[in-house]
Amino acid sequence: MQNLRIERANSEVEKALNYILKNKINDPRLNEFLTITFVNLSVDFRHCKVGISVYTGDSNTVMKQLKKSEGYIKRELIQQVKLPYTPELTFILDEGAKHSEEINAILSSLNIPKESDDEN
């Protein structure tokens, strides 16, 4: 029962954060192509880890601006999602998508001959 409650809260917080980052923040440094990859609320709703993947632009600048905008983001979040507490947000740079793109680029650059269908 507790896990279901946390999962629903994670989902609602993720939706709200996506909306806030796309529509409420007018900082051009945060208008880079970024995605929330995960949201993990603690069981007591006091802490929230948010994974951020930055596809274009300088990821360090984006992370610094998110940290500076944390107070505003928290105020907007608590207005949109009813939680027992206002969670402390921790933004974590998720470089999984970037690594995936690099691996795909390496794999596509390899010259591997295709197997022929005629094995007679």
Image: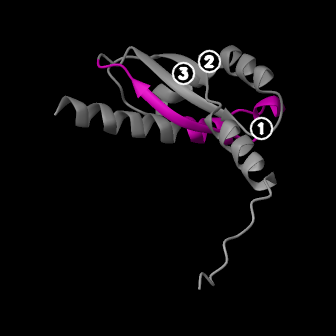
Q: Quadrant of the C terminus?
A: bottom right
x and y percent of residue 84 in the render? 32, 20
Cα–Cα gap, marks 1 and 2: 16 Å
The residue where tag 1 is placed is 31
Q: Residues within 10 Å of mark 1 (few under 14, many from 20)?
A: some
As helix, strand or loop, the secondary structure at mark 3 comes to: helix
Q: Residues within 10 Å of mark 3 (few under 14, many from 20)?
A: some
* Image disc number at residue 9: none
Q: Amino acid at mark 3?
A: Lys
The residue where tag 3 is placed is 74
* Image disc number at residue 70: 2
x and y percent of residue 36 in the render? 58, 37
Residue sitting at x 49%, y 37%: 14
As helix, strand or loop, the secondary structure at mark 2 comes to: helix
Please state the extent of the stretch shown in magenta in the rendering.
Answer: 17-43
x and y percent of residue 60 in the render? 77, 20
As helix, strand or loop, the secondary structure at mark 1 comes to: loop
Residue sitting at x 67%, y 15%: 67
Q: Amino acid at mark 2?
A: Glu
x and y percent of residue 72 in the render? 62, 21
Label 2 with label 3: CB-CB less than 8 Å? yes
For the rendered model, the colour scheme is one colour
Q: Nearer the viewer, residue 51 or 69?
A: 51
Residue sitting at x 65%, y 40%: 97
Q: Nearer the viewer, residue 14 or 72?
A: 14
Residue sitting at x 55%, y 35%: 17
Determine the image quadrant of residue 52.
Answer: top right
Determine the image quadrant of residue 8.
Answer: top left
Sooner in the amino-acid sequence: mark 1 or mark 2: 1
> Above or below — where is 114 with respect to 68?
below
